Amino acid sequence: MRNKMLMALVTIGLAASSAHAATSTENLASTCNACHGLNGVSVGPTMPSIGGLPEAYLKNIMLQWKSGERYSATMGRHFKGYSDAEIAALATHFSKLPWVPVVQKVDAKIIAQGKDASERCETCHGATGSEPDDDETPKINGQWAHYMHMEMLKYRTESLKMPHKKMRNNSKKLDEADVEAVAKYFAAQPK
Amino acid sequence: MNPINRRAFIKAAIAAAPASAFLTLPSTAHAAKSARIVVVGGGFGGATAAKYLKLMDSNLDVTLVERQKMYTSCPLSNEVISGHGKIEDLQVGYDGLKKRGINVIFDDAVSIDAGKKTVKLKGGKTLNYDALVLSPGVDFNYAGVEGYSEELANSTHPHAWKAGPQTLALKKQLEGMKDGQTFVLTVPPGPFRCPPGPYERASQVASYFKHHGMNKSKVIIADANDSFSKKGLFEQAWKRQYPGMIEWVAGAAGGKIVKFDAKTNTVSSDFNDYKGDVVNIIPPHHAGAIAKNAGLTNDKGWCPVDMLTMESSKQKDIYVVGDACLHGDLPVYGAPKSAHSAATQAKVACGAIIAKLNGVAAPEPFFVNTCYSITAPEWGFSVVHIYRVKDGKLVYIAEAGGISPVNMEDEAQLVLQRKLESEYAIGWLKNIMADAFA
């Protein structure tokens, strides 16, 4: 027990002494909780869970919001206040937390409709959204359906700056009636 | 490990790490054995403080004193008045905090003895503290509008500027209105709780009119101020959604209300009279009374604090967070009096308290505020504030933050932007409530 505690303290000490930023990552991350939930597990259907998402994905998206390369309704205004190093550290921090799918109850008919329409999603995100192809692609199993639906509305809005061409094209190829069903299909997947 | 060694280890860890690294500290780590922290006020600021103190060091003895068993969120309560939201969705109890090992006492904290470090409760108890977090919110200065009173607020003329029974009372009054009638809303001089709140309320009232075919009804905003939060965004929304329905009268144009005649339902400035079928007076306010009684307020009734730690500038070991404090470097408000500000301030205070208990310097703070307003279903917008430390001072970061774009490249973008933020507002509330109370 003692050793365990000692180890924990020393680890914290080391981690902190290697941190370059004056404001610690933990400090910054605790302010994210207000909208994204404790440990990055959201309880609000329109806000995404972020704990346990791939590091490269998190880092890219935050940097793209900051530079304006990617449209955001709100987040760009936040990240203009963070240094690139802080963003990288936050990406590392949240990627190390466990991914906790919030499995949402969905009507079996909608699940079937969503599954049928989700074929084009599978290549990158995995059949149930839990096995992304690479570190730049988010897990989407047990992500909030309402959030994913709105995210696809962004990709489907022609004039908006959404940099991921593949995602843009595939979102637009979905039938309007299937967008919500696809979001709900992935939201219902525990793993 | 003997206690001295353990203390040394903790000290070393804190010196190198920020206090918030305590989030990952094992539960056995704490300096003073069961340091006693009292938190007064169980709103967003107080609840967040109680929870995060316990998260950062589970051995702390944390007591939360709150008057009411059920909290009702002010954010999104204007949507209850218009019928777009339900009050039940804004309410939460304190069981979540109790489960985390926080002592929750339902009582009224009546006085603080900063010398003896005690808080006296109405029920007779006296609590000792090593550090006190004070999050009393606001109290109203009814004398600021001659003829208005607490009695009227609790009966015929609810201000509804604290969510709860008055919110429902005002909703009922709105529902009793007929087409062609006028709703008069008065706004006190800043700073007041929720800077965009009055204008969101006016929008929600107009939304009610529109949805009930009351197109001849009007909202008059008699404002003591000459500008307001998110003005361009509100005016754009009013023009699109409620053309001709909402009239804003600036302070310079005679909008500053000083008098109310309940018999004729008329409010008056030094220049104009406004007669309403419903008159909703938001009285001027200041920090909760307990703060003034404890000598924590300035001449304007707000609590100055060390902006990096939230410790009162007037008394040691008392940390004032939320609407009651004077924080930030922006004109009039410093930092906006919002739920999100209160929650961030609370987290900063927790870090500073734990650092001090362990005899080390407070960690460098980071403050953020996000505040959404909804003018109609699918039409929302926000303001973001970020404050950081530069050259030892807390400053607003102008490169970041700001309001949602007023204009966008095309209509599709604008409609989507407003829709997204109206939906984010609801997700934000769920998360920030859980972050404070669950």
Image: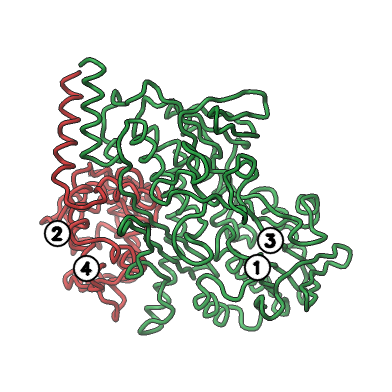
Chain colours: A red, B green
What residue is shown with label 2? A136
| Residue type (three-letter) at the residue carrying disc 2 | Glu
Which chain letter matches label 4? A
Of circles 3 and 4, which is in front? 3
B121 vs A46, left or right, is: right
Crowding at dot 1, Cα within 10 Å, few <14 / some 14-19 / many 20+, comes out as many
Question: Which residue bears the numbered disc 3?
Answer: B282
Tell me which corner region of the image, top left, top right, bottom left or bottom right, holds residue B1: top left
| Residue kind at label 3, given as amino acid type | Ile
- Do residues under tags 3 and 4 come within 8 Å of each other at their CB atoms? no
Residue A110 visible, this orientation: no
Q: From the image, state whether disc 3 or disc 2 is nearer to you.
A: 3
Circle 4 sits on which residue? A64
Q: Is residue A44 above or below residue B96?
A: below
Q: Distance of mark 3 from mark 4, alpha carbons?
A: 42 Å
Q: Quadrant of the C terminus of chain B?
A: top left
- The single residue placed furthest to the right in the displayed view is B263
The chain under label 3 reads: B
Which element carries disc 4, helix, strand or loop? helix
- Residue assigned mark 1: B205
Mark 1 vs mark 3: in front: 3
Q: Using the rendered image, report if marks 2 and 1 lie on a common chain.
A: no
Residue B174: horizontal and vertical position, in percent?
72, 63
Residue in the foreground of this view, choosing between A146 and A181: A146
Give the structural element (helix, strand or loop) at label 1.
Answer: helix
Position of B236 with respect to A46 (left or right) is: right
Asked if the residue at tag 1 contacts the one at tag 2, i.e. Cβ–Cβ closer than 8 Å, the answer is no
- Residue A154 image position (x, y, % from top left): 31, 71
Mark 1 and mark 3, same subunit? yes
Residue at left offset 44%, top offset 79%:
B406
